[in-house]
Image (cartoon, coloured by chain):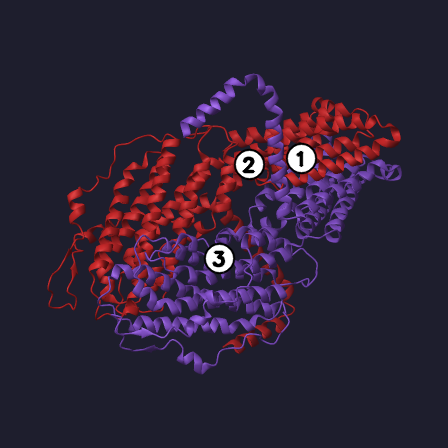
Chain colours: A red, B purple
Amino acid sequence: MDIESTAQEKARFCGIACGSAKALPDMLKAKVISIAKSIMKLGQDDPRRLIHSLKVGLALTLVSLLYYARPLYDGFGVSGMWAVLTVVVVFEFTVGGTLSKSLNRGFATFSAGALGIGADYFAGLFGKQGEPIVLGILVFLLATAATFSRFFPRIKARYDYGVLIFILTFSLVAVSGYRVDELVVLAHQRLSTIIMGGATCMLISIFVCPVWAGEDLHRAVASNLEKLASYLEGFGGAYFQYDGSGVVSKDGKSFHQGYKSILNSKNSEESLANFARWEPGHGRFRLRHPWKHYLKIGALARQCAYQIEAINGCIDSDIQASQEFKSKIEGSCKRMSAECGKALKALATAMKTMTDPSSTNPHVENSKAAMKDLKFALKAASLEDEDFLAIVPAATVASILVEIVKSVEKISEAANELSQLARFKKVEPTVSPEKPQQLLHRGIIQPVLDADSNDNVVIAIHEISTDSPENEKPGHQVPKPGQRFMEV
Amino acid sequence: MDIESTAQEKARFCGIACGSAKALPDMLKAKVISIAKSIMKLGQDDPRRLIHSLKVGLALTLVSLLYYARPLYDGFGVSGMWAVLTVVVVFEFTVGGTLSKSLNRGFATFSAGALGIGADYFAGLFGKQGEPIVLGILVFLLATAATFSRFFPRIKARYDYGVLIFILTFSLVAVSGYRVDELVVLAHQRLSTIIMGGATCMLISIFVCPVWAGEDLHRAVASNLEKLASYLEGFGGAYFQYDGSGVVSKDGKSFHQGYKSILNSKNSEESLANFARWEPGHGRFRLRHPWKHYLKIGALARQCAYQIEAINGCIDSDIQASQEFKSKIEGSCKRMSAECGKALKALATAMKTMTDPSSTNPHVENSKAAMKDLKFALKAASLEDEDFLAIVPAATVASILVEIVKSVEKISEAANELSQLARFKKVEPTVSPEKPQQLLHRGIIQPVLDADSNDNVVIAIHEISTDSPENEKPGHQVPKPGQRFMEV
């Protein structure tokens, strides 16, 4: 087959050499179409990208007016180019990014300009001969010190661009001061054009289809919780779905791998939180919204994702799991994972609607109750006739699920803290907590003699499994995690 | 106690109000000392930071000569400031970063300058009235298209800065062309000063104490393997060290938590790999060193770190583990983790010395043999009198260790691939592989009747445990992971 097709291809290429001139435009056309498709896809995945590009074009065209309009040009002269330069470098995708860069640039230019003029005056005291030497030393010292300060994590996170512009402006002002006499006029012109460029960017980014870093962070963290929830809600059904061989079907395993994107979410969350701090109050967020707290929830979500990654590894285990043992823990495990999923989904919804997430507490309590059931079941399980090796994979899954329950409890606590700090509005709980009596009864082990079974213990899991994900309404919409992530 | 000390403090503050004027310099002094200390620490953690700062100062002072030296100034005029600007913005910590930015800036300035002059000529065809409108439209279109292209991941990773400078230069040239007649002269001056500034940065960054991104990546990946190794080598001893209660002592658990930094290493590795591609051959690295392959090893190391994170969670489990069961799996588990640790350490050493890592294969084989031993031990274990709940934590640890063994095998394969791609030098293996007969014998379960034990199975772990970490030479130096990471 392969040889045949290669020969055919050769014939096609050698034989129709004369046709290649004709084929070239076709190839070019195909290439152009493929590029156009990828451009379309990029725009469709997040239409805000296209809008951002148009906004940059608009801002740049607006500041170009400084050159075209005679009265403005007469005021600023060639300094108008600083406005163009400012627009190109400070216009970021999010409002917070643009504000952070604009303000950093403005303040750094102002302070470095003043310092530069001072340095120039100071150097002038040393006479025509000494001036360049003193200025050189000053530039060297300041550039070295300022560059070093950029290694401090706190400065790096918030003022990196400001320090860069500080070095830049100081060097320019101090050095050019040696030649240009009207230094103050130059510094003033530069500062005012930068303020103009920066103001244009800030106004356009805030008032024309704004992309708020804070809102993005808010949605990203909520959507991460949803991704975890999707996995956990699907997990019980997939893991305990038998295909006869005792191995989990690959189809069943492919449910919602969206959680994987959470594993490496730290950097993007941190930069969004840094930008969000620069943003004014917007929509449902106050000026001093506790953005830092989102990082805490994000870190806990990552912790949970690590555990899911471990459980995902266990599913792939080549050791055949014992059906019998699996059926013993099925009820409580399914319930643990389903209730954790429900709790996380409810937390995500509460975050999105900015309502008090205490309505999720029953789910957390249910998952903890299921965890206790599991412990009872394990304590009472008698395993004399079991192949112990076959038990290990399922026991591991159960054990990691226990860790996940604890992790979800921590996430729930952190979300409640956020709700208090950000004053989410209180609502009547829609999920009614289960009655405590029922909690005490549920999952209790009833020693029953069963003729068909080798065990002397049977766990009453029938009433429990009504909670499990398979029995959910078919219309229940699980959000596509990939899609949501692209929106962020 | 607390109230007392608060009262004392109050008295101190109220009573000596007059002394506050005297205390202020002391507080200032303390503040200055604390800042000085943190500066010292930052410099000591990685002295290259200080050197980098001095290099930036040097480069900036050198390009300032453009202004001070009369013959140079006469040639370039105020365009000399572009050289200063270029140095400040393109000088990065690593050689690759500096080269990437310099070359991006150079090529973008050249192409955008040419395009800008073309646009200016084209707009001139529309007469004095039409020119600004045509130019405005062109700037708008180009800025929008170029900004959108920055969202493509491939362009973002390698040419982001170039596109930025392209927009900048095109706008400046196109717009200022409307006023300045000697456009070509200006473009030429700008380009030559940028080349001067860029060349200064490149030369200083390559020849004065260079910081190679490639070498950093190489070291970072090797050091990550070492961190995993440190954990795994310490794990067996710590987990199976009893303090009577059956709970792992907290002291034992605090060994080498350095692996945690690996969990979020993706971004820094990717940016180092991106920079490394721009670097010329240096030291032991050829020009086309397979930098991309390091990302593969890095990803596998992260996978292993996730599993270690899961195993770390199990150690904290509140379920009391059964001593008896733990002792059954102790031998093989200790051997698995110790051999994995040795394999990773040998891989790290092989990477650092750039020698063929096939000498690590015996360790990988040993860990796989220990995994088989564990399976035998589990298969044969009879547990009728055990509390099953108490077995779960240890079974989970064993099960995750099995996953770690597989993970280490994959890392070893990837490292071997790298060795072939990068042509690491071959060496005689220093670790002699164990004889196959011994492998077959080792850890085989011998049914023995033991009067003291309730089990009917005893595993021969005595010869195995000579491999375990406690028995290693006391002089064996484990690298401090934190320290190494700071160097990277």
Near mark 2 (Cα within 10 A), the count class, few <14, some 14-19 or many ≥20, is many
Q: In this view, does A230 lie above or below A394?
A: above
Q: Residue A295 vs residue B66: left or right?
A: left
Mark-to-mark CA distance, 2 and 3: 30 Å
Nearest to N terminus: mark 1 or mark 2: 2
> Which circle, 2 or 3, is nearer the viewer?
3
Q: Can residue A220 be seen in this view?
A: yes
Near mark 3 (Cα within 10 A), the count class, few <14, some 14-19 or many ≥20, is many
Mark-to-mark CA distance, 1 and 2: 16 Å
The answer to whether marks 1 and 2 mark residues whose Cβ atoms lie closer than 8 Å is: no
> Which circle, 1 or 2, is nearer the viewer?
1
Q: Mark 1 points at which residue?
A: A165
User: Please, which residue is most extreme toward the top here?
Assistant: B18
Q: In which quarter of the view is residue B137 placed?
A: top right
Q: At numbered mark 3, what does the secondary structure look like: helix, strand or loop?
A: helix
Q: In which quarter of the view is residue B190 placed?
A: top right
Under mark 1, the amino acid is Ile
Q: At numbered mark 2, what does the secondary structure look like: helix, strand or loop?
A: helix
Q: Residue A92 carries which label?
A: none
| Whole-percent x, y for residue A407 in the image | 35, 48
Q: Nearer the viewer, residue A343 or A386?
A: A386
Q: In this view, does A175 lie above or below A185?
A: below
Q: Mark 1 lies on which chain?
A: A
Q: Mark 3 points at which residue?
A: B302
Under mark 3, the amino acid is Arg
Q: Which mark is residue A97?
A: 2
> Which circle, 1 or 3, is nearer the viewer?
3
Under mark 2, the amino acid is Gly
Q: Which of A195 and B112 is in front in this view?
A: A195
